Image (tube, helix red, strand yellow):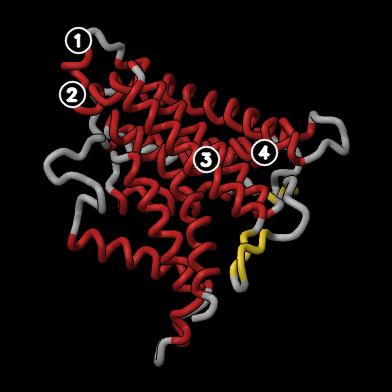
Amino acid sequence: MNELPQQLADGLALGALYGLIAIGYTMVYGIVQLINFAHGEIFMIGGFGALTAYTILPDGTPLAVGIPVMLIGGAVVSVAVAMGAERFAYRPLRGAPRLAPLITAIGLSIVLQQLIWGFYPGAKSKVTFPEFKGESFQLFDGLAISRADAFVLVAAPLCMIALGLFVSKSRSGRAMQATAQDPDTAKLMGINTDRIIVMAFAIGAAFAAVAAVAEGLDKGQIRFEMGFLLGLKAFTAAVLGGIGNIYGAMIGGVVLGVAETLSIAYVEHIPGMDQFGGGAWKDIWVFSLLILVLLFRPQGLLGQRTADRA
C-alpha cells in the first residue's frame, strides 16, 4: 500500500488523457445525439498531424519549442478532418434513422484508419514520436511524476477551464447550450445551429489532438490503430460520467483511469484473485465498473435521467 500515492497519480494522469478524448464524444452527443465512433481515429490523426508539424522544424529544435508547434499542427489536422466528417458524412444524414449515422461513423472510422495505414510514410508499423528526456519530478518520497504525466495533468485542467468559460460566458457557448436543449427552438430564435454543430465537432477534435500529443510524448511512438482502444475507453468514460455532460466526461475519465491503474496494481494481491490481476485483466475490470455503475445509475455519474443532453 506504500505505492498507493504513486498509483493514484498514475491513474489520474491516465484518466485525464481519457477525459480529453471523451469530451469529443460527449459534446457531439450533447448537440446532435450522435455517437461519433470515428472520434478515436480523429484523435489518432491528431497524433500524426502533430508529428508531421514537428518534422518540418529544423533538426535539434528543443522539445519545449516543438510542443506548441505539435499542438497547433495536430489540432489543425484533427479539426479539419472532424469538420469534413460533419459536413460530408453526418450532415446529409440528419433526420435519417439513428442507425444510419451510427453505421456511417463506424465506416468512417475504418476509412480514416486505413488512409493513415496506406498513405502516411512508415505508418504500417509503430512510428517514433518525440518524447521527454530527463528525470521525473520527485514530489516527495514515494511519489514521482513523469514529465509526460505532468504535461497531461496540466493540459487537461487548462482545457477544461477554457471550455467551461467558453460554454458559460461566450455568446457561442450559450448558443451551444440552447441548441443542445432544443435545436428547433434555438433555430427559431435565430441561432445558426449548423455552425454550432460544426463548432462542437471542432472543439472535440482540438481536445483529441491535445490528448494525442500527450499520448505520443508518453509512449514515444504513435500507431495507426491507437485510436480504437483509447477511443473505446474514452467513450466508456463519457458514458460513465453521463454522456452529454462535459464535466462528467472528465470525471468519468478520471474514475476510469484510477480504476484501471489500481486494478493492475492490487487485484492480484487479493486472496484468491491472483489469476485475475495484472495488465491482462485491466480492461475487464474497467468495463465491469462501467456495468456496475450503469446498473445503479443508468444516466451516468453526472447525467440527468429526464434530459440526457448537455
Number of residues whose C-alpha sits closer than 10 Å to that of mark 3, classed few (under 14), some (14–19) or many (20 or more): many
The residue wearing badge 4 is 118
Query: In the displayed structure, would residue 173 be above or below residue 263?
Result: above
Number of residues whose C-alpha sits closer than 10 Å to that of mark 1, classed few (under 14), some (14–19) or many (20 or more): few
Query: In the displayed structure, would residue 170 be above or below residue 274?
Result: above
> In the image, 61: left or right of 234?
right
Please, what is the three-letter code of the amino acid marked with disc 4?
Gly
The residue wearing badge 3 is 41
Q: Residue furthest bottom?
A: 271
| Numbered circle sitting on residue 182 | 2
Residue 33 horizontal/vertical position (percent)? 27, 34
Mark 3–mark 4 Cα distance, whole angstroms, equals 14 Å
Please, what is the three-letter code of the amino acid marked with disc 3?
Glu
Query: In the displayed structure, would residue 226 be above or below residue 275?
Result: above
Residue 213 horizontal/vertical position (percent)? 62, 42
Q: Toward the viewer: 227 or 183?
A: 183
Residue 231 horizontal/vertical position (percent)? 47, 48
Mark 4–mark 2 Cα distance, whole angstroms, equals 42 Å
Marks 3 and 1, the one that precedes in the sequence: 3
The residue wearing badge 1 is 189
Marks 2 and 3, the one that precedes in the sequence: 3
Mark 3–mark 1 Cα distance, whole angstroms, equals 35 Å
Please, what is the three-letter code of the amino acid marked with disc 2?
Asp
| Numbered circle sitting on residue 67 | none
> In the image, 163: left or right of 264?
left
